[in-house]
Image (cartoon, coloured by chain):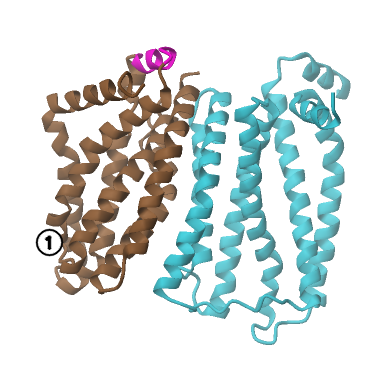
Amino acid sequence: MSTVKRIFHQFGSPPWLFRFAGFAIPWLWAACLGLGAWGLWWGLVKAPPDYLQGESVRIMYLHVPSAWMSMGIYAGMAVFGFCALVWRVRAAEVIALASAPVGAAFTLLALVTGSLWGRPTWGTYWVWDARLTSELVLLFLYLGVMGLAAAFDEPRKGARAACLLALVGLVNLPLIHYSVEWWNTLHQPASVGVEGSSIHPSMLWPLLLMALATKFYYLANLLTRTRLQLVVENRKSRWVRDWVLETR
Amino acid sequence: MTGRVFLPLLRRDLLLAYRRRSELLLPLVFLMVVVSLFPLGVGPGLQVLSRIAVGVIWIAALLATVLSLDGLFRGDFEDGSLEQLVISGHSLPLAALARVAGHWLVAGLPIVLLSPLLALWMNLGEGGWSVLVISLALGTPTLSLLGGIGAALTVSLHRGGQLLSLLVFPLYVPILILAASAVTAATDGLPYNGQLGLLAAALVAALSLAPWAIAAALRLSLE
């Protein structure tokens, strides 16, 4: 058996994934807190204020990583959903479903921090800008996936339905994104001043640190949720009983 | 292949719809009531109405489609004929396509035919009438196809209606944007071929992908 295949099969096995998650979670939290503290200190204290936006630019260090995560997690959720549907990997179902609340939270965070940032810089909490709108639609997609999974009496069926919906959403997502972008530029061109694409290194470094911290937060949170779900679903199996007896 | 699944199913659906003619009118009456509420809400000023006309008519069409979609597979699911269809060995995507085609002929096509009257009510500029009809003719089948995925996913749930709206409305965003901008461009005297072309492209894409997604969702619901 090739290495790739072995890793694939190991990830698909609930006891292995459970033990792996138990081992990885403390390290992931440590990395998240360490990088997050470093990034926040750099961004909130050390980095210079923007010459145009003043101190309000500092919310960027939370806003931009959240927006990145909101999109990345959706793609990840759909990839795991694909694995769950095609190869019927049980663990992939659990991971896909555990991703949804984290992704929705990041989307909400991006929307809230964005509108708080918009107040001092654009003079309003909300504009129907292309990016804001597609982020809002993304939140609806997350809520749909979560709502569908919760609506079923049998959790496995709900999980598989949610995986399929996530996949349909992923096919639609570029379409939604481009149509919204095109819709906005047609109606109100250049009403929103986007900063130049080149960010000064003094601002880029804390941003990258925060981006890494949010990734570790996602992994830690995801694995914690996965572990809980695995225990709940396999509560009658032998390895869970052994684990409970072992840790007592 | 088509003769064995697609046409018999389509004929059955149309016959069922014909036997219950009073139900056929319901989506149309719903559409008219919803559209007629807008002048009451925003005031009868013709200027305002003509500016919001496209949006109102299209959103009413979205709502009417989703309401009628809720029961698309439910009857078949509850009396077991869906199960029989799945184990019959016929192509399930084709069967799903037949159901969606039946749905569009019964619930979508009447919207297209009624739209000139709605355009008149909402004082849509004359240049936009034909484009509104074309945009609805190209867009409502896509709505039925995308909505069919949601209907298939929620078929085994007892209260699927509101959930169905949450699932499918985000997917409808591009269609709404394209259609509204095509009609607005036409009333402003601008070229609108691009938007209509993209609507047609969306229809072709949905036609070629959605039946498989619907079939997968139906299999999943029957597990």
Give the quadrant of residue B176: bottom left
Q: Is residue B158 visible?
A: no
Q: Nearer the viewer, residue A220 or B135?
A: B135
Q: In the rendered structure, does residue B88 fall within the stretch colored magenta?
A: yes
At 16% from the left edge and 34% from the top edge, which residue is drawn?
B24
Residue A179 located left or right of residue A209: left
Estimate the x, y position of residue A67 in percent, counting from the top left: 63, 60
Q: Main secondary structure of the magenta part?
A: helix
Q: How many marks?
A: 1
Q: Position of residue B145 (x, y in %)?
A: 37, 39
Give me the residue at 77% from left, 30% from top.
A8
Q: As rendered, which of B207 and B47 lies closer to the eye? A: B207
Mark 1: which amino acid?
A: Leu
Q: Residue at x 79, y 23 (%)?
A: A15
Q: Does residue B9 sit above or below A109 in this rendering?
A: above
Residue range highlighted in magenta: B80-89
Query: Is A12 drawn above or below residue B65 in the view shown?
Result: above
Where residue A39 sits in the image (x, y, percent)?
Answer: 81, 65
Above or below for B109 versus B8 = below
Check the rendered structure and report the hue given to chain B: brown
Image quarter in which the C terminus of chain A is found: top right
Q: Residue at x 29, y 42 (%)?
A: B65
> Given the image, what chain letter belongs to the residue carrying mark 1?
B
Left/right placement of residue A234 relative to residue A175 reads right
Q: Quadrant of residue B40?
A: bottom left
A244 drawn magenta: no
Q: Quadrant of residue A54?
A: bottom right
The chain drawn in cyan is A
Residue B17 coordinates in the image, percent (x, y): 18, 28
In front here: A58 or B114? B114
Q: Which residue is mark 1?
A: B120
Image vertical order of residue A63 relative to residue B12, above or below = below
